[in-house]
Amino acid sequence: MSVEIKEKHFKPKAHILTLLGEELIKNPVMAIYELVKNSYDADANEVNVYFRDVDNIDNAAIVIEDDGTGMTTEVVEDVWLEPGSDFRKPVVNGERQIVKSPLFNRIPMGEKGVGRFAVHKLSTKILLISRPLIIEYDEDNKNIITQYLADYEIELYINWKDFSQSKHLSDIPIKWKLRKDESTFRFKEKSGTYIHLSGLKETWTKGMARDLKGHTLSMLSPRVKEGSFKINLNFDNQWLSDFPTVDKIIDEAPFKLFAMVDENYNLTFEYKFSLENNKEIGIRKINAVENPKLYERNIKGEIKPYIRKEFELKEYPKEIIEDLLKTFDESLELPFGGFMFELNTFDLDSQSLKDYSVEPPLTRKILKENSGIKVYKGDLRVFDYGEKGNDWLGIDLKRVQDTSWFSNNLVIGFVYLDAENSASLVEKTNREGFVENQSFILFKYLLDFILTQFKSERSKDREKWLQFNKKETKSLFDERISLFKNLLENADLNDDEKKKKILEEAENIEKKYEEDKKILLIPAGVGMTASVALHEIEKLVPRMEETVKTIPLKSEIITDQVQELKQYTEGIISVLRKGGEKPVNITDAVNRAFNNYKLKLSDRKINYIIDIPHNVETINCDKRFFITVLMNIIDNSIHWLDTVYKENKEIYLKAIKEENGISIFIADNGPGFKDDISELIRPFFSRKSDGIGIGLYLVDTIMLKYGKFDIIGSMELSDFGIPEKYTGAVVKLIFNKNQL
């Protein structure tokens, strides 16, 4: 059978340029930004954007003019008229190379060769005038030997309506003039490019103008040196008068963060809380000098749980997850070279505003228009991070799940990336953020980690601030009811019978509170045990299915798996069974708690040692509560041990009989606690990214019923016979109530 081979080349229709402009550039504001980026890449000191007769669509025009290096005839022909050119960032052997600008060594912001499509978004006609600066290099093409103005100027005019749907792109020639008479030049004494856009596609409004102004102000990084690059925006009317800027409220922000992560995952973190109009409450500063263990350290290990969770959510097999985590462990540097992060957060309730804002209505207005976290690569912004409605770091979702978080509309933040080293963070062609590759996912994890640390510090000061304005100290319910009863006892009441009834009612309220608290504690414990067990069962069942399909059936494997399933189900049953205050075998309960984490401990290569002497047998408590307490503490140890790089990770549990009861110590060799116990047991306080912050609060609440929950310092280890190597988190559960 004969085979006929046919060949034909793509022949795009002429109107594809207009279509691409409409699809790739989402709005006129972004179109202006693309043209501004071209000026930046051309080594301009400044770019002027003028709007002429914008009130009259028939005569309206937009002019973009810069003092950059201009375009030679070769650039016009081989770059500007070649959509998708890799002129700025050529690809060599599959990798994108960076060609810095000749004068200022700028990293090019336009990398896909599609910025010229911006003109299609804005208008139907373009007049382009450019006079180039001729630059000559040495033999190695590295050093500039000489530079001079070209003796010509280019003038190019295009009416995009000529690019009709019926014609092919290759059938429409583009012509331009090469002027040689210097007296007719637009650029007589300097190089530059002038673009005049007419036949505008949209009627500009005051709202659009002010929106563009806001975007223009945010296009340049706040860290750009004054005079290095300037964007001037001008409308021939009063649309931009009295335009408020972010600078007016940044300094007054109550909560401030500066963080830096270098290419090796080393974190520097500084925090400040202050109220400009309320000096009485004081100022709190935290930095690496005052607390080096917490805020100047390598955080690579602390990002590892994020990576693990991502792979588990994607349901990768256990072996694949371990291989991927090993790859992460072995990678020494960040693929995007590190970054800086500045964050300012506010509070908008009336009383709070009075404490820090000079002009509360203005603060509200600026936050409404400018809240969010923006990203900058080098000098210029990466859109559309920080735009209205783009909560790209999920702050509002965190706020829904945990009220100690701040919402996105209370934030003004800036992330600064090194343009040269962040090539792995690739902008989408449609200019709506970065491509969601592994580098971007890691970038978000690091920011999420920093935000979690900031939230923890912020919540401490926010709580203090709120209590200060209430002018009263917060106390626990049982403390308040006790105070109320004392006041009642000492009150001068004439009717003893009424006094007795009021006291009885107070005692009934106290009793009901204790009952309700117990009712709530039980499902909290059940929920945690069940969630841990069900998570492991979910991974176990597919493995059991594979085993039973194996021929011949490997009985020893399926037997082990059935035993594992039995342990998890028994773990759930152990907290579902009705409890009550009765003797609980300590060894059995401890083994049950650790068995519930058997697979998790194994995956993370964490060993555990149980040291319970024969004379320590039982404690009087509800078994459900005891297991819940143990599981919360073990779960914390597992999480933080997974963040450290050391050969032997261990959890150590020791029980001892003391004069007034039994104490149980749980210690590990992880990073240890970073906060005072008063913070750790506060509801909703957590340094875990997905932590709810009720674990240690639950532990403390339960232990108040049976004794006390305490944290042991490293200096006290020898007093209780705990080996010195357990210098991480060490807690003590004291059972000294109702133990007879």
Image: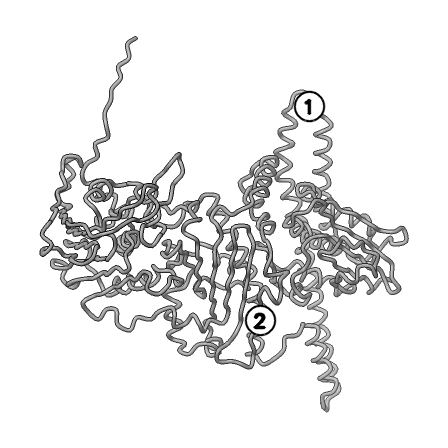
Vertical side of 75 occupied by 393: above or below: below
Point out the frontmost of discs 1 and 2: 2
- Image coords of residue 370 (percent x, y): 38, 64
- Image coords of residue 552 (percent x, y): 68, 20
Q: Which residue is mark 2?
A: 463
User: Which secondary structure, mark 1?
Assistant: loop
Position of residue 317 in the picture relative to residue 225 (left or right): right
Instruction: Give the mark count.
Output: 2
Can residue 34 be seen at all in this image of the molecule? no
Vertical side of 666 occupied by 291: above or below: below
> Residue shown at 39%/63% (left/top)?
222
Quadrant of the frame with the C terminus: bottom right
* CB under 8 Å between discs 1 and 2: no
Vertical side of 438 occupied by 671: above or below: below
Q: Compare residues 684 and 322 and report the one nearer the observer.
A: 322
User: Which secondary structure, mark 2?
Assistant: helix
> Residue shown at 27%/48% (left/top)?
115
Q: CA distance from mark 1 to mark 2?
A: 60 Å
Q: Which residue is mark 1?
A: 553
Position of residue 484 in the picture relative to residue 15 (left or right): right
